Image: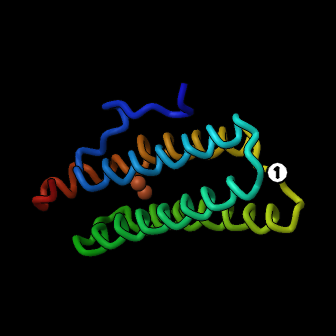
């Protein structure tokens, strides 16, 4: 069983961003598999790096589109993105220094954050961007 399975309740009705979210979910599931199989940090660390890089890319894409059309909720949304990245980067540094372990509590935190963010915060731009002709 994967950590998160994609389903329609996670759709924001914007094709590009649904694809991004699916990719992030795949990366999280990959991390979950690596940890379940007790893979060492040489395997786990590149997965974390890829997850952070891709998440940054996705956040920037959402922010660019929201800013382009002056979506009213953009600053609160950007703030949530920034907080998550800061937390994960902080964790990554602790991990590199040998002061933190990547475990299921981290994965559960990421799973909860992501699903809540998509269903609560991301969905708020759906109808606004749809009206601007984004599909
Ligand atoms: Fe977002
Ligand atoms: Fe998103």
Q: Residues within 10 Å of mark 1 (few under 14, many from 20)?
A: some
Task: Using the rendered view, name the quadrant where residue 20 is placed.
Answer: bottom left
Tell me if residue 31 comes above or below residue 64 in the rendering.
Answer: above
Residue lying farthest to the top in this orientation: 1
Mark 1 — residue?
Answer: 101
Task: Identify the residue shown where x is 26% and y is 55%.
Answer: 16
Front in this rendered view, residue 67 or 24: 24
Front in this rendered view, residue 111 or 75: 111
Number of labelled discs? 1
Tell me if residue 51 comes above or below residue 4 in the rendering.
Answer: below
Task: Identify the residue shown where x is 30% and y is 45%.
Answer: 12
Q: Is residue 114 left or right of residue 9?
A: right
Task: Identify the residue shown where x is 29% and y is 65%.
Answer: 71
Q: Position of residue 54 (x, y in %)?
A: 47, 63
Tell me if residue 10 comes above or below residue 46 in the rendering.
Answer: above
Residue lying farthest to the right in this orientation: 99
Ligand 2 shows up in the quarter that is bottom left
Q: Position of residue 19 (x, y in %)?
A: 31, 50
Q: Position of residue 6 (x, y in %)?
A: 39, 34
Task: Using the rendered view, name the quadrant where residue 62 is placed.
Answer: bottom left
How did the renderer colour the structure? rainbow
Tell me if residue 119 comes above or below residue 60 in the rendering.
Answer: above
| Mark 1 CB within 8 Å of ligand 2 | no
Q: Position of residue 102 (x, y in %)?
A: 76, 49
**Dot 1: element:** loop
Front in this rendered view, residue 2 or 38: 38
Q: Is residue 60 left or right of residue 8?
A: right
Looking at the rendering, in which quadrant would you find the N terminus? top right
Task: Identify the residue shown where x is 89% and y is 60%.
Answer: 99
């Amino acid at each position: 069983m994967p950590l998160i399975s994609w389903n329609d309740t996670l759709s924001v009705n914007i094709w590009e961003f649904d694809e991004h979210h699916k990719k992030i979910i795949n990366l999280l599931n990959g991390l979950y598999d690596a940890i379940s199989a007790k893979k060492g940090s040489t395997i786990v660390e590149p997965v974390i790096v890829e997850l952070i890089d891709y998440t940054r890319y996705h956040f920037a894409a959402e922010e660019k589109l929201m800013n382009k059309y002056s979506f009213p909720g953009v600053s609160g949304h950007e703030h949530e993105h920034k907080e998550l990245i800061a937390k994960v980067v902080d964790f990554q540094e602790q991990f590199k220094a040998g002061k933190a372990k990547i475990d299921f509590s981290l994965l559960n935190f990421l799973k909860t954050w992501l699903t809540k963010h998509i269903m609560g915060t991301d969905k708020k731009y759906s109808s606004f961007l749809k009206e601007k002709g984004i599909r």
